[in-house]
Amino acid sequence: MFKKSIFMLAASCMMYSCATQTESNPFLSEFQTPNGVPPFDQIKLEHYEPAFQKGIEEQNANIQAIIDNTEAPTFDNVIVAFEQSSPILDRVGGVFFNLTEAETTDGLSALDMKMAPVLSEHSDNISLNQALFKKIDAVYQQRESLSLTREQERLLEKIYKDFVRSGAGLPAEKQERLREINKQLSTLGITFGNHVLNENNAFKLYVEKEEDLSGLPQWFRESAAAEAKADGQEGKWLFTLHNASRLPFLQYADNRALREQIYKAYINRGNNNDENDNKSTIAEIVRLRLEKANLLGFDCYSNFVLDTKMAKNSATVMEFLNNLWSYALPKAKAEAAELQKLMDKEGKGEKLEAWDWWYYTEKLRKEKFNLEEEDLKPYFKLENVREGAFTVANKLYGITLTKMEGVPVYHPDVEVFEVKDRDGSQLGIFYVDYFPRAGKRGGAWMSNYRDQQGDVRPHICNVCSFTKPVGDTPSLLTLDEVETLFHEFGHALHGLLTKCQYKSTSGTSVVRDFVELPSQINEHWATEPEVLKMYAKHYQTGEVMPDALIEKVLQQKTFNQGFITTELLAAAILDMNLHNLTSTEGLDVLAYEKEAMDKLGLIPQIAPRYRTTYFNHIIGGYSAGYYSYSWANVLDNDAFEAFKENGIFDPETANSFRSNILEKGDSDDPMTLYKNFRGQEPQLEPMLKNRGLK
């Protein structure tokens, strides 16, 4: 997943009283550190609010200077000046909004809620500033005579459209309503995310009897015992809703009742009629989004969102998703039937339920391929997998990543690397933060602390929730976690290799349905035999993964793909359905979810990957955009065909992908960039074939 540290810039009449906060506040000047990295060891909670205030004042002054400039509006004195108007806000926002995701505290959460409407107001004060928009419009109207580069044209178009889409052309009364909607949405989104985080942290499944651990691997038992001890319950075993705990439990636990308990706790997050209930919150978010879209001239929120994306409109996305659904659902039904046969052999008279799927899939994997996840994990030591991803990047693009010591970090788990190009020049600084904890939201993502622009190189981070080391046993990843590491590093490469002039067009500042191409194509290298031999080494013996085991990995690549694709598409269609609504009167989100899934014919053994009450993606930037993973999956499979045709490390193909995709950011139309690399528009067939859907 990709999360750019984008934040709404805002105005407020807040006051802060302590002069020393201003004088010693590290955000108020360029960071006085080597490479300009955030000085996490100096940053305190009390620095953020004054820095936001000072940043707001700074940007307001810079915008007023643009307005007051008596010279004729030009690209430089309007567009570039606006682009560079918020250095303090860029610094404080880059740190603050990353930490509220990766290492939040009660203090940060409270400040996040306090600042949201303030920043929303500032954002609206800018986008609804008629004097500023008049200047931007003047430049836009003369764009064809300005002899701009393609990137400059994109930046001008992007800024102009952002203002129009933010209501710059609306009458005053509609602008006022839009301001109120934006304020409400800013706090509702934080509330939603905090509820999900609270639910994740609140659930604790303690096992007291060793017989209830039947089926669980020894490493997992040791991990659960360590978790219980850390929670003050030594002698017990603790299991949580974090992926690194929940998924192995569902995969291995013989105790069916406990599997059901942890599964239901997961899929009912935000739906327990308590202080963390999200039903009314998401219903209000959907209602306000529709009203906003209507104010801006769109019939539904999805068409408003998609107007600037590759897909362009809801009809195109729905046709795309429904087409894939016609391939995925039959495959999932066949898989369910196969799992039921396996259950029938046991003679218990049980019918396959959702909490059985992972458990019997693991048994079926062993039966069909003589392969278990436990056979693979010893070869996937985290540090070796990471080194494998780094080696692939070196062979493809000539870059090197060297661990740095003494760089300030926000948590002891965080490691930092310097990234250099083949000529020795620095490309950026890369942070990794791999293990789950109470202050971190679930999942995995890439973000940034500093954007690339011109000669300024970026600071990029990968945040994940992988299996922790226990005692003398290092972190050993599942195959899914291996692919996740490669995926997020693909996003990081997109952010690190960018060569653009402006922050708004650099790196991952691209449309949502294109941003997953660099991440998803990078997953392909993870399981290539040549690559596995580079990094898949037994953590105890150093033995390279045997050819026979590699062959099994390849044989089972399309295994369970009906389930994986169906749960993904179900979530994407649910997202689209919620945002395709043209009326929200009487909306009951769970009843609507059930109706939508029933209409699709989704089988009861599969739930959407994310249900409405904990669908953080559609709060955090993927609203009417979760389809992007599948859309980009067409792109990445088609793009990887070029590498397979020419050799997975072919220098010419790699250089073309780097120069046409990774370096270009949003400096040109994404389909143009893709065709410059591939020579044609993407084809669907490679994706269907690689997922075993055809």
Image (cartoon, rainbow, N blue to C red):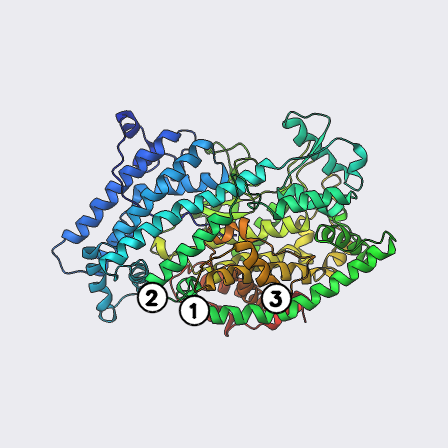
Mark 2 vs mark 1, CA separation in Å: 15 Å
Near-viewer residue (131 or 283)? 283
Q: What residue appears at the point 57 percent right and 53 percent down from the top-left corner?
A: 611
Q: Is residue 477 left or right of residue 85?
A: right
Residue 635 position, x and y percent, is 54, 66
Is label 1 in a helix, a strand or a loop?
A: loop
Residue 248 position, x and y percent, is 70, 44
Residue 6 position, x and y percent, is 39, 49
Q: Amino acid at mark 3?
A: Leu
Near-viewer residue (431 or 141)? 141
The residue positioned farthest toward the left in the image shown? 70
On the image, numbered disc 3 is attached to which residue? Answer: 600
Whether residue 7 is visible, yes or no, is: no
Find out whether the residues at labels 2 and 1 contact each other: C-beta distance under 8 Å: no
Near-viewer residue (60 or 663)? 60
Near-viewer residue (157 or 437)? 437
Label disc, if present, on residue 206 of the rendered structure: none
Label disc, if present, on residue 297 of the rendered structure: 2
Label disc, if present, on residue 312 of the rendered structure: 1
Q: Is residue 264 left or right of residue 458?
A: right
Q: Amino acid at mark 1?
A: Lys
Q: Is residue 305 left or right of residue 340?
A: left
Is label 3 in a helix, a strand or a loop?
A: helix
